[in-house]
Amino acid sequence: MARRSAERHYIGRTGWLRAAVLGANDGIISTASLVIGVAAAGTSLGAVLTAGVAGMVAGSMSMAAGEYVSVSSQADTERADLAREAQELIDDPAFETNELARIYARRGIEPRLAQQVAEQLMAKDALGAHARDELGISEATTPKPIQAAFASAASFAVGAALPIIALLATPQRLIVPTVSGTSLVFLALLGAFGAKVGGAHIVKPMLRVAFWGALAMAITAGVGALVGKVI
């Protein structure tokens, strides 16, 4: 009988997938909203294009910096917790063993067996056992700041480029409806892609992303039209 291959789980993708989907979603919505808002104000095609490109570049850099800082902060917090746990293991290993056993017992393992499991895991990798079962820190979910920053910046740029391409292929009088419609399609496809890669059903994510994108673009178009009339 052939041996089963190693199972693949979706949880290992959460780090880059979250950053990539967030970046692309933000790129589409913010750039499309910016383009629609400026176009609704009655400005020239050159001004609309300039605003869109500037928004794409600024947004990409902002996403990269924001993701790097936020994920680095998460990593710093995890390292601080691990350092504290390592010191507690040195100061009172018996208490830490019993603490681990109580965790397993609360999960349904018979108390005596839970104590044996805790002792064996402590003997092999005490800090790893506490990181995983007490703190909820595992290798699959370890924050990776560089990966998150790159994924966010690249995906934002890709997402932002889509409304700009639609803008370039559209007569000026049709910018608002064309960019709005194509951006909603892009957002729906992004929702489906994120759900598919993450192993979820695609309909709900598609509707969720499209709804919030439509709301953002509608509000921005209204504000742009109002400002255009005032100016």
Image (cartoon, rainbow, N blue to C red):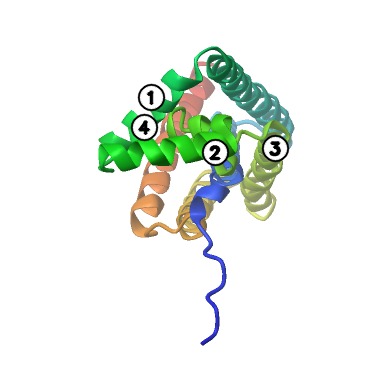
Q: Which residue is mark 2?
A: 138
Task: Give the number of the disc on residue 99.
Answer: 1
Answer whether labels 1 and 3 touch (C-beta < 8 Å).
no
Marks counted in the figure total 4
Q: CB under 8 Å between callouts 3 and 2?
A: no
Q: Left or right: where does residue 136 sit relative to residue 77? A: left
In the picture provided, is 146 more to the left or to the right than 231?
Answer: right
Provide the secondary structure element on which disc 3 rests.
helix
- Closer to the N terminus: mark 3 or mark 2? 2
The Cα–Cα distance between marks 1 and 4, rounded to whole angstroms, is: 5 Å
Q: Is residue 223 above or below residue 185?
A: above
**Amino acid marked by disc 2:** Ser
Q: Which residue position holds label 3?
A: 153
Q: Nearer the viewer, mark 3 or mark 2?
A: 2
Question: Which residue is rendered at x = 52% and y = 43% of the image?
Answer: 176
What's the distance in space between the residues labelled 1 and 3, CA to CA?
42 Å
The residue carrying mark 4 is: 101
Residue drawn where x is 52% and y is 30% of the image:
131
Asked whether the beta carbons under mark 1 and mark 4 sit within 8 Å of each other, the answer is yes
Label 4 sits on a secondary structure element that is helix
- Give the mark nearest the N terminus, 4 or 2: 4
Residue 191 lies, in percent from the top left, at 46, 52
Relative depth, front residue between 204 and 58: 204
Of label 4 and label 3, which has the lower sequence position? 4
C-alpha distance separating marks 4 and 2: 19 Å
